[in-house]
Amino acid sequence: ETIYEKYVDPEHLAILVDYMKTVGARYYLQCRSGRYGTSDITEQEGALFAGDPGTKEKREEIFGKITTDNHPKLRRDVNKFAYYEANADIDTIRKNLGDYFYVMESSFRLSEKSDGEVTIRGITKATGMQIYLNAAGIGREDVIAFGDGPNDHEMIDFAGVGVAMGNASDD
């Protein structure tokens, strides 16, 4: 049973896709129906994720398959946007994308350039936890959350007990 869904609206998705092209970023869209990227990321995924976490099969086992979609602005089920190798730093990207989006460092630093994740501002893992806990009648003091990346901060802070994993980033 789905309790809550929130997707990037079409107007803002178009702004995001167009902006990422201007900064030369490779990207994929995380959607309810799967992960989608333009042909440049699906063809070069091995080089982008080289060595960590290994083979294409292992990456697909961990993250799921990235399906080619050369018309990303037409997707209507986007909940996260991951970008790599942008020719702009994260502060510049935040400023240029505006208040609708929340831009954070990537959980997986894959390049010397800017890598990050973009979501709708106010929609975090902590938001999802709160919605679920309300529906299930559980208090946050009864929750333990584990995380290892920048996109886990709010969740760790929200939970009754929050644990940063041993491999957690310094961010």
Image: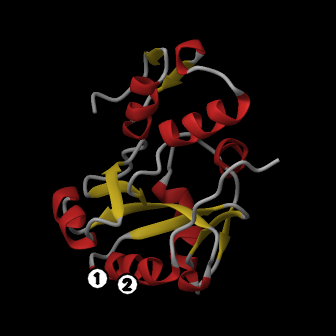
Residue 7 point in image, percent of width and height: 57, 66
Residue at the disc numbered 2 = 18
Inspect the image, locate mark 1, and give the three-letter code of the amino acid beneath it.
Thr
Residue 152 has which mark? Answer: none
Q: Nearer the viewer, residue 96 or 120?
A: 120
| Dot 1 and dot 2 residues touching (CB under 8 Å) | yes
Q: Quadrant of residue 151?
A: top left
Inspect the image, locate mark 2, and give the three-letter code of the amino acid beneath it.
Asp
Q: Nearer the viewer, residue 33 or 167?
A: 33
Residue 132 point in image, percent of width and height: 65, 36
Q: Nearer the viewer, residue 5 or 71?
A: 5
Residue 127 in the figure: left or right of residue 135? left
Residue 147 in the figure: left or right of residue 32? left
Mark 1 lies on a secondary structure that is helix
Residue 89 point in image, percent of width and height: 19, 60
Residue 22 has which mark? Answer: 1
Which residue does the image show at 38% across and 32% down from the upper left?
A: 153
Badge 2 crowding class, 10 Å Cα cut-off, few under 14, some 14 to 19, many 20 or more, is few
Q: Is residue 16 above or below residue 18?
A: above
Q: Quadrant of residue 99?
A: bottom left
**What colouring method underlies this structural image?**
secondary structure
CA gap between label 1 and label 2 equals 7 Å
